[in-house]
Image (cartoon, rainbow, N blue to C red):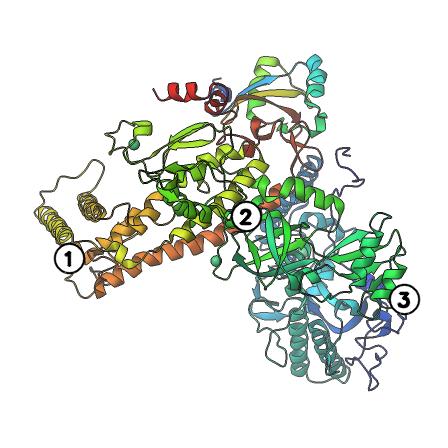
Amino acid sequence: MSPHVFGLTKRINSIKFSLLSPDEIRRMSAVKVITADTYDDDGFPIDKGLMDLHMGVIEPGLRCKTCGGKVDECPGHFGHIELAMPVIHVGFVKNIQNYLDATCRECGRIKLKDDEIEIYKQKIEEAKKMGASPLELLFITKKIIEDAASRPICPHCGAEQKKITLDKPTTFREEGRKLTPKEIRERLERIPDEDLPLLGMNPETARPEWMVLTVLPVPPVNVRPTITLETGERSEDDLTHKLVDIIRINQRLRENRDSGAPQLIIEDLWELLQYHVTTYFDNQTSGIPPARHRSGRPLKTLVQRLKGKEGRFRSNLSGKRVNFSARTVISPEPFLSINEVGVPEEAARELTVPITVTEYNIEKMREIVRRGSNPKGEKYVPGANYVIRPDGRRIKITDRNAEDVAKKLDIGWVVERHLVDGDVVLFNRQPSLHRMSMMGHLVKVMPNRTFRFNLAVCPPYNADFDGDEMNLHVLQSEEARAEAKILMLVQEHILSPRFGGPIIGGIHDHITAMFLLTHKNPKFTKEQAIHMLSYLDYDELPEPHKDENGNEFYYGKELFSLILPKNLNMEFKSKICDPSVCNNKCVYEACPIDAYVVIRDGKLISGTIDENAIGSMKGKLLDRIAKMGSDEARKFIDNMTRLAVGVISYRGFTSGIDDEDIPEEAIIQIHEIIKESIKKTDELIELYKQGLLQPAPGRSIEETLEMEIMRVLAHARDEAGKIASKHLGLENPSVIMARSGARASMLNLSQMAGSIGQQSVRGQRLHRGYQDRTLPHFKRGDLGALARGFVESSYKKGLSPTEYFFHSMGGREGLVDTAVRTSRSGYMQRRLINALEDLKVIEDRKVVDTAGNVVQFLYGDDGVDPTRSSGGENVDMDEILTDVLGDKYLLRRRK
Amino acid sequence: MVRFNVLEHELVPEHYLVPKEEEEKILKELGVKKENLPRIKKSDAVLRVLERKYGHIPIGSLIKIVRKSPTAGRITVYRVVVRD
Ligand SMILES: [Mg+2]
Ligand SMILES: [Zn+2]
Ligand SMILES: [Zn+2]
Ligand SMILES: [Zn+2]
């Protein structure tokens, strides 16, 4: 059907579900199971028992009595149990109820008049002809059943109908009298084939009475293997346990029935059999207690095997465990390139790469094999764990046979050698929400037991080092390695398709360090400069400057310029830019706070390098360099992170709570402001109580009051913050971090130094808790600032008990929000992926599905790859004009 | 009888019937077979309006739709009329 898909010769059109008839169950059965026993005293499967050899083999050495196959050859065969009395299949209770309701209790016809039947039949035919989906057909059926069920008298035989109720999960009652499964089965048998289509059934493949079981299929032993513990003790599968129960009760029921036991006893046993069969299908059926193992653990029966996150579908089919993968804790390593990943030696010796032996590498491979699977020595050298002969046999390499195997090694063999530096692997952190969650890295084998990588790669993985673990996959084919290297390598993902800007870039200390290096262009002695540059690949320092005493020195901006690409021209505002300093009129290079970055021919002329230049997500400089090519960008980020480590470790950088110390007068001033504001809110409340408050347009008076109070108190916090910031200058480490964008914000600092401010839940002042008040410490109806969650203290000073409680209320909202958000977005992600997983962009940029159906005629309507765009736009005219006109354009742009 | 013309609604993009003789050329340009095109149901309200203009529109006809796109301004897409 679709020539687009290579290798796809057949396409599934539809899947038909049907019912197994008792005859069919008997026909496919290899053995009638009659005893509940499994193995005899010798550990041999008992004939006609639950482990009968006709149902397949799980022990090596034995042969299947049905097909003669050995353990791996026999696919397993079904057996069956003849039930002494019929029982209801829990999976079809709903259907059975529908059929009982819709048909006559006497004659079994559907309770519709002949002409009505004709009309409904035509309706179904028509819908089918128009290609109605099974769901649409189901909808029609539902209506028919509803209609038929509403008739109190049978239109065919005139019999009066009785109301049938369902006692969950499997007991039907007719006006209080219990219907036995046998009676139910008899009624269902009476429904004629002609009426079945109206009930949504195809009489060619299914009959309603098959929903009441008389024969139970026994799954092959392969499906429920016996597990032999180390102690030699045998442990049966949960399904086998359940089948044992069924057979035992079945036997007792049969004996009692045949010996003519009292009806009461038979009914009890019958119900017990129903319970066991029900829990055999679904052990979480509501209304009955789950069957338990001797240890008290609920049994995992058929439905439990399939359902939910741990079920067959989501855990074993949509997601699988794989070989050649590793998982461990991650930690930072600033001296690795962004492309690299540090792999522990221990893991590197377990993870292998298959290498085909050729005439060119045979000597090297021999050497590797000779080393065995655990080479000794100070330095890590690769060994090999297995060799694979051309006939497909795997030979495990041991210290004993290493020499031997190495000698025998020949062209065409495959050696599974240990990881070496430079191998391509995939590295991943869950939740894998975007494509940068799994990137290609180059291996660097290292001591110790963690995976390590460059800190600039934290943002795409959203990783930190508080115990995060990550997964690593070793690629096993040449094609996979090529794809990983070309498409998935970290340097190819510096620009995010989410916003067309860099997602890999400087964080935290990188930004602080670059700020310290470039802000106001500090001078460094030769010794300092050498130390800071020692982590980089520079053999020579630039020409030094000389001060009045003849001492040589270097400017920080010069040192930074060393890592810039030679032909770079650009200018932009730093993060620290504050328009109010320059009276809202930027003065460019002359900026008094050095906040206008000018780069000419790869030299930093003015401005501070901070988050706006090199930060992940925000860095304009990074963005620009990334567009010069991924190699250039990788080099820049590697150098920048190394330089940052050099700068910050040489200079030293510490932050403490005393960073937020402000003078006594300032504290008094802040108090004054807050007291003033609290007084103002009291005045507003007074005004409100007197009914003098004018409502804002579209608001009630109460809302207006709340709004006004919120405004006054927010203003108070801002003013307090302003006073605090006045005493917190750029020489303060906490302020450096906040202003440069490295971490935290000025608001955080003012909350530490000044006042924490209003706490809120759902954007409103706190108001819930006790009757008409937030806490019993306040009068009922108190609307004042302090009674409604305003925290006047600072973090540094500490909170009063009531303030602490309010703060916890506000803090909880954040926690609840993130918890709710992650679970919801996870579900949304699953549905999106299920809908989009097999769409692809083909050569002419059309988006198609696997059948070649067009989803978009041009990817994103414009065919633009967001990672190759400028913040989502097709072309960045500024960039092009700067490239062409350079200085001239940049200067003209300023006007 | 006054019937509402859905094409005049702000949220409904422009729809045109592609003349039979142009179909082949367009499909060739698109590099798509007709059965792989997005579909529009014969019962779609837009088709009822278009039939007032073009007369009967048989199953399998090509409909050209010109719509606004946040990324590309105005774009042209095609749909094939299907039985519903
Ligand atoms: Mg963490
Ligand atoms: Zn077999
Ligand atoms: Zn009847
Ligand atoms: Zn300025």
Q: Which residue is mark 2?
A: A433
Q: Tell us which disc is closer to us: 2 or 3.
A: 2
Whole-angstrom CA distance, mark 3 to mark 1, is 84 Å
Q: Secondary structure at mark 1?
A: loop
Residue A408 position within the rendered picture, expressed as x and y whole percent measured from the top left = 90, 60
Residue found at the far bottom of this picture? A41
Residue type beneath disc 1: Asp
Residue type beneath disc 3: Gly
Can marks 3 and 1 be said to lie on one chain? yes
The chain letter under disc 2 is: A
Q: Is mark 3 within 8 Å of ligand 2?
A: yes
Q: In the image, what residue occupies the spot 41% across and 48% down?
A: A528
Quadrant for the C terminus of chain A, please. Answer: top left
Q: Which residue is mark 3?
A: A69
**Residue A668 falls in which quadrant of the image?**
bottom left
Name the residue nearer the viewer: A877 or A304: A877
**Callout 1: few (<14), some (14-19), or many (20+) C-alpha neighbours within 10 Å?**
some
Residue A358 position within the rendered picture, expressed as x and y whole percent measured from the top left = 85, 49
Q: Earlier in the sequence, mark 3 or mark 1?
A: 3
Whole-angstrom CA distance, mark 1 to mark 2, is 47 Å
Residue type beneath disc 2: Leu
Horizontal arrangement in the rendering, residue A452 relative to residue A750 (left or right):
right
Name the residue nearer the viewer: A888 or A55: A888
Q: Which residue is mark 1?
A: A782
